[in-house]
Amino acid sequence: SKFVNDKWMIKNGFLNDAQEHKPWWWNIKVQKLNLLAPLILLPEVSCQKAIEILQEKGYDQAPVVAESGLILGMVTLSNTLSSVLAGNVEFSDPVTKVTYDQFSKIGLEDNLGKLSCILENDHFAIVVHEQMQCSGNGSSSMKQMVFGVVTAMDLLTFVSRNSKK
C-alpha cells in the first residue's frame, strides 16, 4: 500500500512531487532554513548527563552520533525523563537505551516540499550532508554528517517570516 501512497513515495525519494498548485516555498532548498548547528550526543553519555545537557542548552532533542559519524538515532528530553521515571532505565544507563532509531533524514539540497511531507508524520527530521572522507591508504567513502534537526515549527517559522503578501 505504500507504493500507492504518493506522500510515502515522495518522502522516500521514489517519486518527484507532481502537485500542481505548490505553495511559493515548495521548491526552496532546506539549506535556506538557516538552521543552528545541532547539539550532538555520543552514545556513551548517561541518561542523567543527557537530561542535564539538554536542559542546560535549552534543547528538547539531540541526535546520538557515534564517533565514527554513524547516526544512531535521536534522544528526546521527554522520552528520557519518562523512561527514567517509569523505571525502564536507570539514570546511569547510556543514552542509547532511550534513543529513537526510527527517524527521517533529509538533505540540504532537498526542497521544503519534501520536508513538509516528512513532517506530516514525523515530529522532526535530521538534516544531513554527504561528505567524502579519504583515508591514508587512498580509499575514500561517503559519510553523512548531521547538519541540523528540523521540526514543523522551523518550517512554519520560515514560511510565516518570508510569506509573500
Image (cartoon, grey):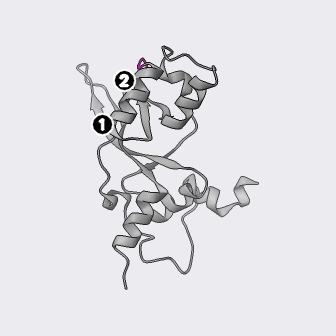
Task: Reply yes or no: does residue 85 show up in magenta.
Answer: no
- Tell me, yes or no, whether the highlighted magenta stretch contains residue 44: yes
Residue 132, numbered label: 1
* Residue identifier under label 2: 68
Q: Which kind of residue does numbered mark 2 sit on?
A: Ser
Disc 2/disc 1 C-alpha distance (Å):
14 Å
Q: For this view, does 38 lie left or right of residue 70?
A: left
Q: What residue occupies the far top of the structure in this picture?
A: 92
Point out the stretch of residues depicted in magenta: 41-45
**Residue 27 placed where, x, y %?**
42, 69
Q: Residue at x 48, y 48 (%)?
A: 125
Q: Which is the main secondary structure of the residues drawn in magenta? A: loop
Residues under numbered marks 2 and 1 in contact, where contact means CB atoms less than 8 Å apart:
no
Residue at left 48%, top 77%? 23
Identified by mark 1, the residue type is: Met
| Disc sitting over residue 87 in the figure | none
- Of residues 132 and 33, which is closer to you in this image? 33
Image: 104 above or below 45 = below
In this rendering, would 41 be left or right of 73? left
> If the image is split into quadrants, where does the N terminus sit?
bottom right
Q: Earlier in the sequence, mark 2 or mark 1?
A: 2
The residue sitting at 48% across, 58% down in the picture is 152
Dot 2: within a 10 Å radius of its alpha carbon, few (fewer than 14), some, or many (20 or more) residues? Answer: few
Q: Where does the C terminus fall, quadrant-wise? A: bottom left
Helix or strand or loop: what does disc 1 sit on? strand
Residue 26 on image: x %, y %: 45, 70
